[in-house]
Amino acid sequence: MFRLSPLRLRTFRRCRLRYKYQYVDRLPARPTSQDVVGALIHAALHDFFAYVPLHERDEERLTTILDEKWQALVFRLGSPAERQAWRERAEEQLRRFSHQHDLLAQPLALESYCQVPVSDRVALVGRIDRVDEEPDAALHVIDYKTGARPPEVDVEQLRLYAIMVERKLSRPLRRGSYFYLEEGDVWSIHPTREELETTLAQALAAAEEMAAERDYPATIGRHCAACPYLASCAQRDQIAQLPARGGEGW
Ligand code: SF4
């Protein structure tokens, strides 16, 4: 069974060389500081909603959970000044979250792993941050984003999550949302049946392309700054010739 995740699909579309490193050669990735901090924030939110009783939920309890987790991974975040900057940024995201969202929410699922067959040869897979229940019992799938909001929102990921959640829980989905914790924005879709069918057909076509790919050409761009294979990329010399871009690590 070919295991197709939204990340795998996005990686294939963005840079086939990275796809080769990650999914064909299975080279170990070097997580960026953003990846490390993002994982800590996700873990803090998971534990808060999974384990903290309703009467103990508040902003301070949420940031205390971040504190407890921080010590385990902080050594991976560069110099003391860089660590401090990342720490402040992570705490700000969680404080903003606690002001904007319902801390008494009781999600149906948290960091739920889904593997859903969608054809004879392909299964959609993914770990979904959170699934809530709307007042009328329809489902709401939520994905936390801890990086800066991209110019183009990845609608496909939310639609694929919608397909997975509906099939796994055998209930209709009303809404899919990205919670952008850095900006404090929420971006939502209300996918129609036709949109979900179109997205699934496109994903299955992409899976065929992945299976047939042999050349894995590189696509160089600003996304290289966040690529976990940048340090060992065969195109690194060419990437180094690009004009420096402030704040992107080039
Ligand atoms: S650094 Fe850029 S070109 Fe190299 S694998 Fe990553 S995304 Fe592709």
Image (spheres, rainbow, N blue to C red):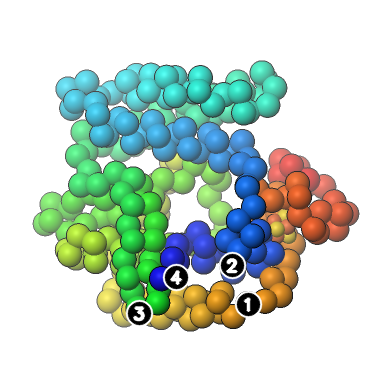
Provide the residue designation for mark 1: 213
Does residue 99 appear in this view? no
Does residue 241 appear in this view? yes
Which sits earlier in the primary sequence, circle 1 or circle 4?
4
Which sits earlier in the primary sequence, circle 3 or circle 2?
2
- In terms of depth relative to the viewer, which is nearer, 122 or 224? 122
Q: Residues within 10 Å of mark 1 (few under 14, many from 20)?
A: few
Q: Type of residue at label 1? A: Glu
Provide the residue designation for mark 4: 2
Q: Nearer the observer, disc 2 or disc 4?
A: 4
Which sits earlier in the primary sequence, circle 1 or circle 2?
2
Which sits earlier in the primary sequence, circle 3 or circle 4?
4
At 70% from the left and 54% from the top, the residue drawn is 224
Reply above or below: 223 against 164: above
> Are discs 1 and 2 less than 8 Å apart at CB?
yes
What is the secondary structure assignment of the residue under circle 2?
helix
Q: CA distance from mark 1 to mark 3?
A: 20 Å
Farthest left residue in view: 136
Picture disc at residue 12 = 2
Provide the residue designation for mark 3: 120
> Are discs 1 and 4 less than 8 Å apart at CB?
no
Q: Ligand 1: does it lie within 8 Å of the C-beta at label 4?
A: no
Instruction: Give the percent coordinates (x, y) of residue 182.
Output: 50, 39
Q: CA distance from mark 1 to mark 2?
A: 10 Å
- In terms of depth relative to the viewer, which is nearer, 100 or 242? 242
Q: CA distance from mark 1 to mark 4?
A: 14 Å
Instruction: Give the percent coordinates (x, y) of residue 47.
Output: 32, 31
Instruction: Give the percent coordinates (x, y) of residue 220.
Output: 74, 62
Q: Residues within 10 Å of mark 3 (few under 14, many from 20)?
A: few
